[in-house]
Amino acid sequence: MAWSNSSSLGLRRVDISSVEAGLGAVGTPLLLPLRLTDLFEHNGLSGTVTGLQYQDHAYDVEIKGNYAFTADGSNGLTVYDMTRDPTVMTSGFVVSNIGADKLKPTLGTASGIALWTNPADGKSYAFMACGPRGVGVVDITDVSNMKLVKVFEPIKLEEGKVGAADGPVRGRQGCRQLRLFQL
């Protein structure tokens, strides 16, 4: 399986086994049709998941076990259970979300994610690129009860004053750099 991110339609799972089996050929493209059960959207054709009525985004995804951890734009971090049917809104395919707030999203505009498990205590964390909010750290040890650890907001010093930094944090690279520091 491969995963495709869409900034307006959510997360897509694509079966690429026919490509890996060598069924495609130069000049003869192999079409990879999507099934409805491959469309992970919390607000789509199949309905809306209660509490996540905002636009679907999937800027980045990390897979861990049966879960797809998604950088979901202004929705923050959305976790999907890949074993559940996403065409049934009550199936539990959306495991949890943290940061979905239309007015001032806790995790800004989440556009990147990197997962890390601390070998010393076994706790797992998601490091999120949060656009103008900086880098967010979420404790994902209990996926159904995620907790915001901290948001490191970018600042700048100019003429003796502290202000907001000019550049937002985007993409996975900013997340990977932060996890080098101890929490």
Image (cartoon, rainbow, N blue to C red):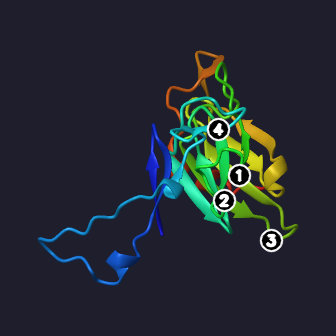
**Residue type at numbered disc 3:** Pro
Residue 76: mark in rendering: 4
Q: Earlier in the sequence, mark 2 or mark 4?
A: 4
Where is residue 69 drawn, in percent x and y? 64, 54
Crowdedness of circle 2 by 10 Å Cα count: few (<14), some, many (20+)?
Answer: some
Q: Are marks 2 and 1 in contact (CB under 8 Å)?
A: yes
Disc 3 and disc 4: Cα gap in Å? 26 Å
Residue ID for mark 1 = 91
> Taking the image as drawn, is residue 183 in sight?
no
Disc 2 and disc 1: Cα gap in Å? 6 Å
Disc 2 and disc 4: Cα gap in Å? 21 Å
- Examine the rendered structure and indicate whether residue 150 appears above or below residue 115: above
Nearest the viewer among 21 and 5 is 21
Where is residue 127 drawn, in percent x and y? 66, 50
SS for dot 4: loop
**Residue type at numbered disc 1:** Ser
> Taking the image as drawn, is residue 101 in sight?
yes
